[in-house]
Amino acid sequence: MAVLSLPQLQRALAKTPPRGAFYLAGSEAILKDEALAALLDRALDPGLRDFNLDYLSASNLEPDELAAACSTLPMMADVRVVVVRDIESWKRKSKGKQPAVRYLEKPAPETVLIFVQGNDEDPDADLAAHCTVIDCKALLGEALDAWLEDRLQGAGITLAPDALEHLLRATGGDLGTLTAEVAKLSSLEVSGPIDRETVGSLVGIRFGETVEDWRDAVLRDDTARAIALVPQVLALSGVSGVRLVNLLGTSLLVLRWGRCTAEAKKIRDRQLAEQVKSLMFKIRPNVGSYPPFAALVGEVVGRWSLPRLRTAIAATLAADAALKNTTISDEGGIVTDLVLMLATSRARKAA
């Protein structure tokens, strides 16, 4: 079983057309759509697509229907494509799945079979063993940056560096939201790079008022700014106290690793930032764009001793538990109290 990311698939398709079976899995529906489109565009002539493309749904597929579709010869083309969606509906020994496994053991050479899994669970092992798996998991760090840059270039849009960072922060890296915002930006008639104020007005979130800006203010011990931002970020669509606390807790864990590394290797600033960035690409924490956060860790690590970090992480866990208690409704108050507690811990646990 080979596993490819979407960029790896695109590079492979640039060299040779698809053959065999593919399995699209992961949490990002947009990436699955893009992978499917790339496979279809490379495999089929647009003028003959309707004659050589079948869409099936695993949820209502008859046991012999898949084999029949895959054994049909292509019309005036080298291959035909069969797409099977909703394969998560197949259980381990379902009537639909077993014929599919048997077909994969001896597939038709003139058919490209594409399975599309609708949920974000792991691929079915029996099917994936015979397929090239396209991993469409959530994008983070440089992978997200590259995806967005590609969409901006395709739309003929240039953003100022701080505008690009604000767009990522304001959307939380959600691909659906980013796609919609890129469409808005493409309608603007501007010359030169688009600035952060323009991006902020379109997105509806002003520069410096995202959830990551709140997190940054907390870690920089800019307590007044962090408290002022609490009601603003909680008013944003899709933002809750639990989301804020989870972001801060994850960030504190990465910062703790950074502090341990700084003490062990006697490094700070840029050297430490590079170490932190490398770690994040391995463990993929949900802390926003990796390069800016790694730089932030290098900047603030001296403020956060290990005892202070232990206290802060414990307080964050307690706040998370309080927010998930259905008898408590003042999430703004809980988050504000957490900010104040972390600010107080600086005086008690200073490095």
Image (cartoon, rainbow, N blue to C red):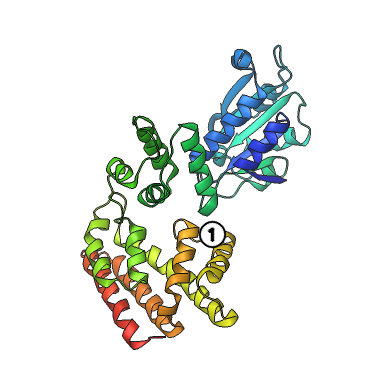
In this view of the protein, can residue 99 be seen by the observer?
no
**Residue found 50% across the figure and 48% down from its top:** 145
Compared with 164, 116 (above or below) is above
In this view of the protein, can residue 148 be seen by the observer?
yes
Question: Looking at this view, is 296 or 214 the one in front?
Answer: 296
Q: Quadrant of residue 333?
A: bottom left
Amino acid, disc 1: Arg
Q: Is residue 278 left or right of residue 227?
A: right
Q: Which residue is mark 1?
A: 284
Q: Is residue 34 left or right of residue 315?
A: right
The image shows residue 237 at horizontal and vertical percentages of 29, 49
Q: Is residue 109 left or right of residue 38?
A: right
Compared with 11, 210 (above or below) is below
The image shows residue 125 at horizontal and vertical percentages of 67, 48
Question: Looking at this view, is 164 or 311 the one in front?
Answer: 164
Q: Quadrant of residue 131?
A: top right
Number of marks present in the image shown: 1
Q: Is residue 13 left or right of residue 183?
A: right
